Image: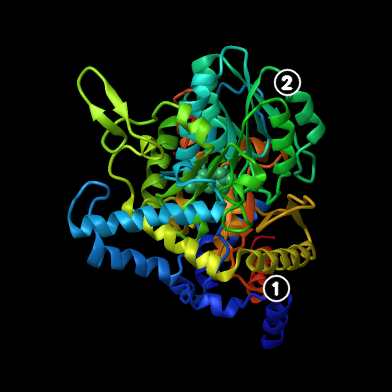
Amino acid sequence: MSTVKQRITTTSGFDVEKARQDFPALHQQVRGKPLVYLDNGASAQKPKIVIDTISQLYAHDYSNVHRGVHALAERSTKAFEGAREKVRQFINAASTREIIFVRGTTEAINLVAQSYARNNVQKHDEIIITHMEHHSNIVPWQLVCEQTGALLRVVPINDSGELILEEFEKLLGPRTKLVALVHVSNALGTINPVRQIIKLAHAQNVPVLLDSAQTAPHLKVDVQQLDCDFCAFSGHKMYGPSGIGVLYGKEALLDAMPPYHGGGEMIKYVTFEKTEYNELPHKFEAGTPNIAGTIGLGAAIDYLTGLDLDAIAAYEHDLLGYAAKAASEVPGLRIIGTAREKASILSFLLEGVHAHDIGTILDHEGIAVRAGHHCTMPLMRRFGVAATARASFGLYNTREEVDALIAGLHKVKEVIC
Amino acid sequence: MSDLRDLYEEVILDHNRNPRNFLNKPDGTNRKAHGFNPLCGDEFALHLVVEDGIIKDVGFEGTGCAISTASASLMTEAIKGKTEEEAYALFDKIHKLLLQEDRSADVGKLAVLAGVHAYPTRVKCATLAWHTLHAALESENKTVTTE
Ligand SMILES: Cc1ncc(COP(=O)(O)O)c(C=O)c1O
């Protein structure tokens, strides 16, 4: 074990055993076995610094933000707005005016759908998505299409789970008003060539929204370098709290958009005749926000940057390669999603065994995986399956845990087949 | 491992490997229903031939996990030749068994399904076929879901 650890530390400069110590939840037994948590794609565990930051806030500094003149309001507001600056740096946005706090990726996409798309698309216009979208990047656009008479167009994928770019170029035309796509697929692990897609779309003056829910915990997202127009992600998948997420939008676009929700915080001046809206980013943040969640997200970002995202990405890349190779040696196992560029996700089928049974039997071994359609039913249909089993890796997973997964899969076959 | 065998009983594994009345679409089918569990994508179609209040023949098709497949297979065996009333009564007994409201009910071979109760996330797998049966008997020729 120490030799493996040694090698990993030297190849990526990342010390996984040290990082594991930061996550209290990892150190427990489940059904008498050490927990092997491989459901990070659904949600990640939290480092102690996030847990402590939130309890410190509630124990000492908590109050509503932006409203009080007293000491606690000042402390909470400072920490809250400090988190916004941390997010700005994390994704290299030009200004904190471009960082809108929302509940998560889902709300971020719905905000853009209702506030931007609904006001900018008309009957017969087109919105382009891809065949590998999460339901949260499908349904909000379907709603807009129902409301406006616009059409949803879908970029097809090949059998490896990669976008067919030529088809995207064919779909992109004068009627296209928006492109919305997943950056890293939660069901396949495919890393899409978003830089190239954004360039193609921008050549036709079409803005692009990136669903970066699965990207933020694994790869560096630089919104200025990518030049995306909108970018959505969730705190809970990047080792932060649930109930908090981020919408990044280019300032000029956000400025022109009407508010999404009305209420306190998002106004400057209210009379019964007319209301003047607050400036960005507050225009989109009606009501008391998720104060502790936001500050906890700031702590998660500090944690990730402290570890060095590039080192994490290199470590996880190595681990995924190890897992894919080991899994492909299990007789009857078929990996769904074999794109050349992949991150963190191993989706698979086991001949003669339903994904749900895999999930239950692995759980008996203390191994947490997800079994189901992963909120990507159209994608499952594309591969002719109802469900897959999915192991999704985080920065704290190890080769020993991959070995436990493989042993667990042999057990599954023993029980069912 | 031993408690895992409470769920994956030998009888259940056998019915999963070799489901009975599977892919059988009996001639004269006059009741049918489609069952779907949106959570895991399990999906079955059930075909019944009901004459003079008696279930003369039955078949099912579709895909599902070991628990839902075995439950459907066991069910088809159990209801063949039964009256509609008996089938409804069995539905009630199984429902109570799976929800552990009544563990004493005599359901014969179907008792193997009782182990599912210890796995709350899997109870819906076991009930899918039975809800589909209920819908078929009511002649609601439509999709039922376990949600
Ligand atoms: C690719 C992708 N998009 C969107 C979402 C939705 O995120 P949330 O549920 O945090 O809003 C998820 C996670 O479930 C996801 O993996």
Q: Which mark is residue A173?
A: 2
Q: Chain of mark 2?
A: A
In this view, A168 is above or below A12: above
Which quadrant of the structure image shows residue A278? Answer: top left
Q: Give the quarter of the figure containing the N terminus of chain B.
A: bottom right
Q: Which mark is residue A409?
A: none
In this view, A286 is above or below A293: above
Q: Amino acid at mark 1?
A: Ser
Check disc 2 and report its element: helix, strand or loop. loop
Check disc 1 and report its element: helix, strand or loop. helix
Q: Which mark is residue A12?
A: 1
Q: Amino acid at mark 2?
A: Gly
Query: A78 or B105, which lies in front?
Result: A78
Q: Chain of mark 1?
A: A
Q: Which residue in the rendered view is the most extreme toward the right?
A: A166
Callout 1 and callout 2 share a chain: yes
Residue drawn at point x = 62 percent, y = 30 percent: A207
Task: Determine if residue B142 is in view.
Answer: no
